[in-house]
């Protein structure tokens, strides 16, 4: 069974007793397109039918399901991926795990978003640096989101433990 077929079965289950025509009215997506998503295959080309992130956003809203979960089920993301989004405040980096645990609305991930599944070694070592990690907004410890003050305390403790690595 293909990945998109699994997604289609999942989508059909989420739809429940609603008809495809009802879903068409609720989402603005044609019932025939929704049908091909549920089948997982385009009947004309016989190729897998993968919904775009924008379509998934409409479905998530209509079905009252987590957008990130649909992105994951459709094969766009997993918890080990990195995402970079340009915002008015600058560039923000998210991991798939952070997206899954966010309280705030998700950044809009489109097919044009930078999905850095394969990132350069330089970027990877930058992201792995604990000092960079501790500056991220969404860090949790046993499921509890750490405040800026708590993250600063961790940084101070690390500086005391490893003074030889502190850059002045």
Image (cartoon, rainbow, N blue to C red):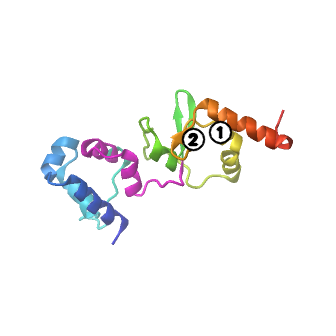
Depth order, front residue of 120/65: 65
User: What residue do we see at 66% from left, 52% from top?
Assistant: 120
User: What residue do we see at 14% from left, 47% from top?
Assistant: 22
| Magenta range | 56-82
Q: Find the distance from the CA under tag 1 to the CA under tag 2.
A: 7 Å
Image location (x, y in percent) of residue 51: 33, 53
Give the labeled residue for mark 1.
134
Image location (x, y in percent) of residue 101: 46, 44
17 left or right of 69 in image: left
Q: Quadrant of the C terminus?
A: top right
Image location (x, y in percent) of residue 154: 69, 38
Image location (x, y in percent) of residue 151: 64, 35
Determine whether 142 is above or below 74 in the image. Answer: above
Q: Residue furthest right?
A: 164
Q: Residues within 10 Å of mark 1 (few under 14, many from 20)?
A: some
141 left or right of 3 in image: right
User: What residue do we see at 27% from left, 56% from top?
Assistant: 11
The local secondary structure at tag 2 comes to loop
Determine whether 168 is above or below 113 in the image. Answer: above
Identify the disc placed on residue 139: 2
The local secondary structure at tag 1 comes to loop
Q: Residues within 10 Å of mark 2 (few under 14, many from 20)?
A: some
162 left or right of 143 in image: right
110 left or right of 144 in image: left
Depth order, front residue of 1/168: 168
Depth order, front residue of 61/118: 61
């Amino acid at each position: 069974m293909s990945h998109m077929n699994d997604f289609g079965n999942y989508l059909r289950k989420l739809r429940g007793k609603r008809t495809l025509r009802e879903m068409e009215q609720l989402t603005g997506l044609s019932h025939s397109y929704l049908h091909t998503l549920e089948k997982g295959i385009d009947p004309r080309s016989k190729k897998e039918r993968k919904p775009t992130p924008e379509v998934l956003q409409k479905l998530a809203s209509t079905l009252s399901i987590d957008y990130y979960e649909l992105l994951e089920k459709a094969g766009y993301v997993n918890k080990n991926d990195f995402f970079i989004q340009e915002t008015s405040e600058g560039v923000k980096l998210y991991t798939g795990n952070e997206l899954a645990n966010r309280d705030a609305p998700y950044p809009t991930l489109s097919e044009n978003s930078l999905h850095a599944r394969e990132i350069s070694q330089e970027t990877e070592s930058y992201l792995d640096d604990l000092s960079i990690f501790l500056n991220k907004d969404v860090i949790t410890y046993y499921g509890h989101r750490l405040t800026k003050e708590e993250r600063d305390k961790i940084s101070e403790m690390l500086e005391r433990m490893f003074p030889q690595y502190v850059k002045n």
